[in-house]
Image (cartoon, grey):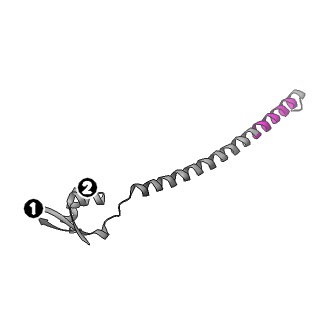
Amino acid sequence: MEIELTIREYAEIMGVSPRTVTNWVREDKVKSYKKDGKRLIVVDDKDLPKPVTVEMRLLDLEKEIKRIKRRLSDLEEQNKHFLETIKKQGAELGRIKEIFRKICKEGDW
């Protein structure tokens, strides 16, 4: 169904500035006409973007929060593994240093 919108209304719905819509009118990119000295944009309501409801946005945010929590959990597990590896390598390095000191003291070096 065709509806009539002011330049400001159309700009707000489309997420652009009124100046952009005025340019579109001048370039014949949108259908319009003047009524009582006011420019009206004629558009089929099917061509307008669907409004995002608060509920839909909340659901999207909840999904994103769950995804982030899973990722955080994965990263925490990975960090735990890295810390264990570093601890083991530190202990091994300590043993190697001790062997090296003994070799140097014995003069076998």
Q: Name the residue furthest left.
A: 36
Dot placed on the residue nearer the N-terminal end, 1 or 2:
2
Instruction: Return the x and y of residue 25 as percentages of the image width and height.
Output: 19, 65
**Residue range (magenta):** 88-104
In this rendered view, identify the residue nearer to me: 97 or 78: 78
Q: Which residue is at 25% across, 58% downward?
A: 11
The reply to whether callout 1 and callout 2 are in contact (CB within 8 Å) is: no
Mark 2 = which residue? 17
Q: Which residue is at 35% across, 60% downward?
A: 51
Asked if the stretch drawn in magenta spans residue 93, the answer is yes
Q: Name the residue furthest top.
A: 105
At mark 2, the secondary structure is: loop
Q: Which residue is at 42% across, 56% downward?
A: 55
Q: Which residue is at 51% across, 55% downward?
A: 63
In the displayed structure, does residue 74 sit left or right of residue 88? left
Q: CA distance from mark 1 to mark 2?
A: 21 Å
- Disc 1 residue type (three-letter): Gly
Mark 1 = which residue? 37
Residue 14, picture quadrant? bottom left
Q: Name the residue furthest front.
A: 55
Asked if the stretch drawn in magenta spans residue 59, the answer is no
Above or below, 3 relative to 59: below
